[in-house]
Image: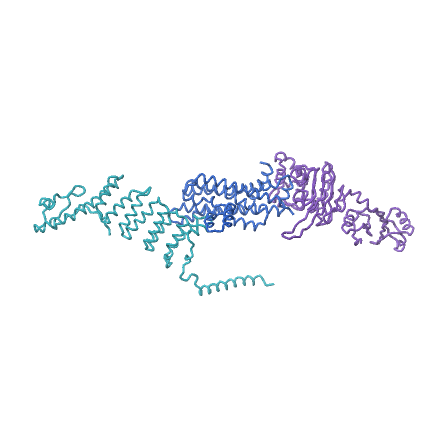
């Protein structure tokens, strides 16, 4: 990897690692995950299920939050504070800048999720749940989902303000979560033009529900290997598309 | 410029006034009236979508809430939406077992509505066909509360056929057949269980059932024959052997263990050496 | 081959969603020779920073070309040999000085190992020794400026482009920077910088380009620009009455009891001096006054031909401090 991309990536990671907000969010993620023990006391029957459900939900929620917040600020801050000038005035192309930023974000998410995952695994083991490889698989899927979210927020951050980036990214995330119902609703549309359009939209919008295997994992429903493979490839392809689009937009960006 | 301490006093005073007004407002307005907030609980399907991927958690929380809610005895009319709530929970995550079982339990014990419970349990059976617990519980409720032994037997039949079903289900079924006054079939089933018993406990238990059925079958017949004898000879037979010898019975049937039944010549009653009160009606 | 060449550079901005276009640069033509110090001078809003951003590829040009050593300048390849310091620089405040310089080096695909010594040397050279591990958020403006210079030099560039490098520096800082730039020229580097502080420019530059309203008004060697303009002379005297000076063909002003006569040519000096002495006056000083850069600058600003102001000297023979004596209409 070119030192310039690596340098930008590591620097981006460093920015998060030295940011108090980041640590706060990770801390709260872990806190809420551990508080799942309290929730599990309230249920009748399978307490371990509730513990896993609540814990994974907390980790999911906070990681998504971290992904969105670090992503939307990233490029925007560089442009606002003009730190981007320092980088782009060097022999660094706009492509390298975006790729480096993305890799730095990916590294950040890996660290956040990794920390939460390790602690949660230990927690489950101590609570008598042993090691559930399904949960490990879920964390992998979650990581891929986070990469998509990060790529989306990076895209918006490259051309609009943080507030709008936030709104767009959150909207796409929520839509992505319910895409599994999309085709069902689509079946009610009769006008051919709209049918074609909505079909195209189905593939354009991010289908994030495929990564959300936490419900199945806790229920003990096994994932089909092909399904997993296709999900992984989907994530990589979608991220690639987003990055390409971001680079295209960013290349035309003027720095007044 | 207003002095700082006046401002602080004004802040506190105004807040107290606002609280007071809120209280007065509340006394004039009834927030829920007779309507429970759960009239507008969305259907399970809607909740599935609205949970934005946190389906399991949503079901868990609703379930936990319901347990707390239904354990609170001072809430009146709290069973109005019982079925609706448990339908919602089980629709969000159909493969989550506890809500079916606990919900049915609450419906039977607290709301005293067994048919509602049976509907919920059957829903569970459809959602998780491999689970024997649902039919087991349904069978039990039919047996204990509805006293509908035929129906209970059907449930136990279903349960016993499911993978992982424990042996005692078959025994329950046999017992229920017995309870529904079909001693021949019951006897056959117990014989089957006796032969396939894997532990001493199971064997003993089967034997006891067989003894009882036999006794219950034989004793009334013997008693009838004794009555006939009395009619003929104007006295009770001195012993069962005499009864046999007089030709009213071909032979005196032994009990299941091959021993003689007990006979009291003064009262003219036959009884079994041991009695098992299976029939608790 | 010229170090930097800009031909017919045009740049306009469109206000968001408005049809109106704002032409910022209306056709810039300038060139910078190898190994010289070039001063880029102009008022606020003239287009200095816009021009520089076009050179660095931060803005896209609408027309014209920019060449570095004969090759297009706004490319990563060209930027490999250019060092750039932006106006009011802002660096990642969560890094330390040393970390920042290593990061800057990595952007040139220079590994950390290769540049380890260089970083230490540069830190020392810009006067930041002792502050290498301090986080940038604790740096003062002057320190940031120095660090900016260090990061502009990290790749040992052939051309340095500095946007307002003197802003925010105290007099010591300015002197250090002047010394540094001069030494860089000794090393054979080319320096192109914009500034408002005309005195500093005057002391250092080889050539000057004056930009006004999006176009270059004047460009050339400083000595030529200044010597092309009329020099004049000042004769400072006292112990004389005003009416005794009236016959001398000169403007004069009075200050602190002294009279300052402005003479158009050196031929008139002797005559004036004799006249004063004849009237028992005392000659305090005879100063040749060259036009300063500021004069040229303001003359361009106001669009008029240069007119010698009525008084320049402060009467004590000290450094010339131009007194704006009103519009030269």
Q: Residue A128: which quarter of the image?
A: top left
Is residue C223 at least partly visible in the picture? yes
Farthest residue in the right direction?
A: C278
The image position of residue B280, as x and y in percent, is 24, 51
In the image, is B266 to the left or to the right of B76? left
Q: Colour of chain C?
A: purple
Query: Which one is nearer the viewer's eye here, B265 or C131?
Result: B265
Q: Colour of chain B?
A: cyan
Q: What is the letter of the blue chain?
A: A
The image position of residue C232, as x and y in percent, is 84, 48
Query: Which one is nearer the viewer's eye here, A193 or A103?
Result: A193
In the image, is B266 to the left or to the right of C265? left
Farthest residue in the left direction?
A: B233
The image position of residue A158, as x and y in percent, is 59, 46
The image position of residue C143, as x and y in percent, is 66, 44
In the image, is B261 to the left or to the right of A200? left
Q: Which color scheme does this rendered protein use?
A: by chain
Is residue B67 at least partly visible in the picture? no
């Amino acid at each position: 990897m070119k030192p310039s991309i690596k340098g930008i990536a590591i620097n981006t990671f460093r920015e998060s690692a030295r940011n108090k907000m980041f640590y706060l969010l990770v801390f709260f993620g872990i806190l809420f995950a551990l508080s799942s023990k309290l929730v599990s006391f309230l249920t009748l029957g399978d307490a371990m299920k509730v513990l896993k459900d609540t814990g994974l939900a907390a980790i999911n929620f906070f990681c998504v939050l971290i992904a969105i917040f670090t992503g939307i600020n990233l490029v925007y801050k560089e442009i606002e504070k003009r730190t981007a000038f320092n980088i782009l005035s060097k022999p660094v192309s706009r492509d390298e800048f975006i790729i480096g930023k993305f890799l730095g974000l990916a590294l950040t998410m890996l660290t956040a999720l990794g920390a939460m995952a390790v602690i949660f695994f230990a927690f489950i083991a101590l609570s008598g749940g042993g090691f559930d490889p399904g949960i490990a698989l879920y964390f992998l899927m979650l990581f891929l989902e986070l990469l998509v979210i990060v790529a989306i927020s990076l895209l918006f951050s490259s051309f609009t303000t943080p507030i709008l980036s936030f709104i767009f990214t959150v909207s796409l995330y929520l839509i992505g979560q319910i895409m599994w119902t999309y085709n069902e609703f689509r079946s009610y549309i009769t006008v051919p033009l709209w049918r074609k359009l909505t079909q195209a939209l189905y593939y354009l919008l991010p289908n994030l529900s495929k990564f959300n295997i936490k419900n199945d994992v806790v229920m003990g429903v096994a994932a089909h290997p092909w399904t997993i493979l296709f999900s992984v490839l989907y994530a990589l392809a979608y991220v690639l598309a987003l990055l390409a689009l971001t680079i295209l937009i960013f290349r035309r960006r003027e720095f007044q | 410029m207003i002095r700082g301490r006046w401002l602080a006093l004004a802040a506190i005073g105004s807040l107290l006034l606002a609280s007071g007004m809120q209280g007065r407002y509340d006394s004039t307005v009834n927030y829920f009236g007779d309507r429970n907030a759960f009239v507008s609980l969305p259907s399970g399907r809607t909740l599935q979508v609205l949970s934005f991927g946190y389906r399991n958690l949503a079901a868990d929380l609703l379930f936990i809430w319901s347990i707390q809610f239904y354990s609170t005895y001072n809430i009146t009319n709290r069973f109005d939406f019982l079925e609706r709530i448990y339908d919602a929970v089980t629709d969000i995550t159909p493969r989550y077992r506890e809500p079916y079982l606990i919900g049915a339990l609450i419906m039977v014990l607290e709301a005293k509505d067994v048919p509602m419970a049976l509907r919920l349990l059957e829903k569970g059976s459809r959602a998780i066909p491999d689970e024997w617990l649902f039919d087991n519980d349904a069978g039990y409720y039919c047996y204990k509360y509805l006293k509908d032994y035929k129906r209970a037997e059907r449930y136990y039949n279903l349960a016993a056929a499911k993978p992982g079903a424990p042996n005692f289900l078959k025994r329950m079924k046999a017992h229920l057949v017995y309870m529904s006054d079909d001693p021949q079939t019951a006897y056959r089933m117990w014989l089957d269980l006796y032969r396939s018993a894997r532990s001493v406990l199971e064997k003993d238990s089967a034997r006891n059932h067989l003894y009882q059925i036999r006794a219950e079958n034989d004793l009334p017949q013997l008693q009838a024959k004794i009555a006939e004898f009395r009619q003929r000879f104007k006295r009770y037979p001195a012993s069962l052997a005499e009864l046999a010898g007089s030709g009213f019975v071909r032979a005196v049937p032994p009990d299941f263990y091959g021993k003689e039944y007990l006979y009291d010549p003064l009262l003219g009653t036959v009884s079994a050496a041991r009695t098992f009160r299976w029939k608790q009606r | 081959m010229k170090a930097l060449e800009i031909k017919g550079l045009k740049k306009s901005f469109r206000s968001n969603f408005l049809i109106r276009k704002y032409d910022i640069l209306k056709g810039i033509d300038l060139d910078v020779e190898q190994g010289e110090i070039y001063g880029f001078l102009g008022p606020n809003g003239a287009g200095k920073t816009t021009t520089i951003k076009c050179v660095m590829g931060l803005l896209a040009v609408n027309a014209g070309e920019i060449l570095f050593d004969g090759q297009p300048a706004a490319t990563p390849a060209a930027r490999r040999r250019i060092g750039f310091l932006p106006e009011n620089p802002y660096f990642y405040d969560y890094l330390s000085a040393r970390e920042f310089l290593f990061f800057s080096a990595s952007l040139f695909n220079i590994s950390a190992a290769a540049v380890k010594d260089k970083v230490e040397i540069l830190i020392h050279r810009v006067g930041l020794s002792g502050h290498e591990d301090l986080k940038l958020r604790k740096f003062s403006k002057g320190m940031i400026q120095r660090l900016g210079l260090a990061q502009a030099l990290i790749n040992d560039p052939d051309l340095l482009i500095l946007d307002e490098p003197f802003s925010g520096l105290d007099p010591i800082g300015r002197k250090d920077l002047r010394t540094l730039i001069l030494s860089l020229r000794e090393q054979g580097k080319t320096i192109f910088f914009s500034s408002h502080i005309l005195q500093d420019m005057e002391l250092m530059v080889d050539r000057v380009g004056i930009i006004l309203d999006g176009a270059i008004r004047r460009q050339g060697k400083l000595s030529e620009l200044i010597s092309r303009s009329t020099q004049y002379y000042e004769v400072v005297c006292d112990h004389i009455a005003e009416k005794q000076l009236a016959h001398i063909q000169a403007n004069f002003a009075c200050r602190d009891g002294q009279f300052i006569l402005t003479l158009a040519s050196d031929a008139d000096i002797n005559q004036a001096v004799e006249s004063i002495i004849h009237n028992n006056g005392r000659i305090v000083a005879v100063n040749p006054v060259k036009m300063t850069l500021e004069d040229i600058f303001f003359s361009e600003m106001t669009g008029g031909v240069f007119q010698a102001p009525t008084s320049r000297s402060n009467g004590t023979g000290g450094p010339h401090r131009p007194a704006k004596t009103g519009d030269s209409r």
